[in-house]
Amino acid sequence: MKVLETYQNFYFVGIGGIGMSALARYFHASGKKVLGYDKTNTKLTTALMNEGIDIVFEDLIDERITSLEKENTLIIYTPAIKKLGILDYLNENQFEVLKRAKVLGLITENTDCIAVAGTHGKTTTSTLVSHLCKEADLPFSCFLGGISENFKSNFLYNGSQYSVVEADEYDRSFLSLSPDWAVITSTDADHLDIYGDKNTIEEGFRQFAALVPNDKQLFVRKGIEIGRPHLTYAVNEVADYYSDNLRMENDKIYFDFHTPTETVKDFIWEIPGIHNVENATVALAILNNLGVDFETLKKAIANFKGIKRRYTKHRYQNGKIYIDDYAHHPTEINAVVSSIRTFYPEKKLLVVFQPHLFSRTRDFADGFAESLNNSDELILLDIYPARELQENFEGITSSWLLDKVTLDKKEVSTLNDAFNKIKEKEFDILLTVGAGNIDTLYDPICEWMEKN
């Protein structure tokens, strides 16, 4: 394959994906011509187009496609897209076609790559590592799976010595990377359409861990068996690196951080949840190992604003609270709801949840029902299909899932009807949660709650 830098055109099939868009921004910032296709126009694709990237939303072989020359064009695709006429045309005409993960691996192989993997927590952790690198002014670039509230993007270039990447386990993509440093936050069962069972996904993470050359640069949450020597991290229990003495004062979280040789008291930040302190713990461990002083890290932690759709919280004058989160697995929903119940135990909680994928809904139905039972009232949206077809999952519907939920107050709704239903409800806290297009409710809800 030719060296990446020799290509002048980069065509992205599925450019609106969060990982794909970070790569698109990288090549666009490098002065290359970037264009692509996506099925749906979203806030993210609109942002890309405003930055000067050409995107189409119809599967048509038009002049933009036929004018491309295979000698100077690289095609980058996501395995989430199974069938597309544009991709068929490009393959038939012998363009170089690579998966996103392969290209990311090629970009980062000449850097000290910090790769963050895990079925939960990888977006927050990789974004926090990137934020700490930026505040410490390290020469780094990052490719993230979420939009940082601090730098308003999923990509940032501040140099090329280090790279921070979210290592995606879907389709075993993370095995294309060459990590010098790595984090494994969790290995819970997920993506069973790819892996089949929990044992197979755990084996995938062991293969990822084996890519890290140095035992002292592999950080694994305590309790996960990864099959090789590594450093551990934890919250409220002793590990190589751990945090404890968590307390909340005036909506801020305080905690103490322990390394193998010292204790640093009173880190302060505004990101709620024990699971997020866990993410902070490993981020601090890595930056400490990179030689960043704790005074800098304390300031950086304090001004971390989080990630869009990761416990994005708004408090209104009438006392009501609105929280929006990307959680789409029972473990993630439990973490969000548990945080709400811990800090607001007397508040009435309305949850609006959009299941993501028929296969995930089928595989974790009982877990979803159990986590959703912790709300006071539930609006369950239709399943967001993403890459799947309903005809291949007969009987797997939101009504089928709702039957497993034991709440008295529960109902199924379309996305189009959801906002009007929300406006009719009594609640103290509203939580919208899911990984599909439920985010289209965010702006209307914010505007409505601001006025009321």
Image (cartoon, rainbow, N blue to C red):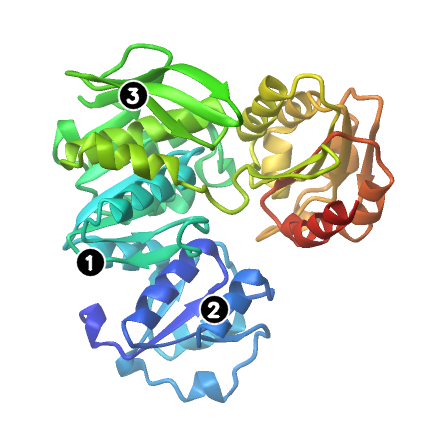
At 17% from the left edge and 41% from the top edge, which residue is drawn? 180
Give the mark nearest the N terminus, 3 or 2: 2
Q: Which residue is mark 1?
A: 159
Q: Is residue 330 visible?
A: yes
Secondary structure beneath label 2: helix
Q: Viewed as shown, does residue 198 lie left or right of 183?
A: right
Across and down, in percent, residue 80 comes to 49, 54
On the rendered image, what quadrant is the N terminus found in?
Answer: bottom left
Please give the name of the residue rendered at 61% of the width and 25% of the height, measured from the top-left corner: 340
Residue at the right extreme, as displayed: 424
**Residue on which disc 2 sits:** 48
Mark 1 is surrounded, within 10 Å at the Cα level, by few (under 14), some (14 to 19) or many (20 or more) other residues, namely: some
In the depicted structure, whether residue 438 falls above or below residue 48: above
Q: Position of residue 316 (x, y in %)?
A: 69, 39
* Residue 102 picture quarter: bottom left
Q: Secondary structure at mark 1?
A: loop
The image quadrant where one finds the C terminus is top right
Q: Separation of disc 3 and disc 2 at Cα?
A: 37 Å
Q: Quadrant of residue 339?
A: top right
In the drawing, what numbered circle is on residue 233?
Answer: 3
Residue most extreme to the top: 237
**Disc with the residue nearer the chain's start (3 vs 1):** 1
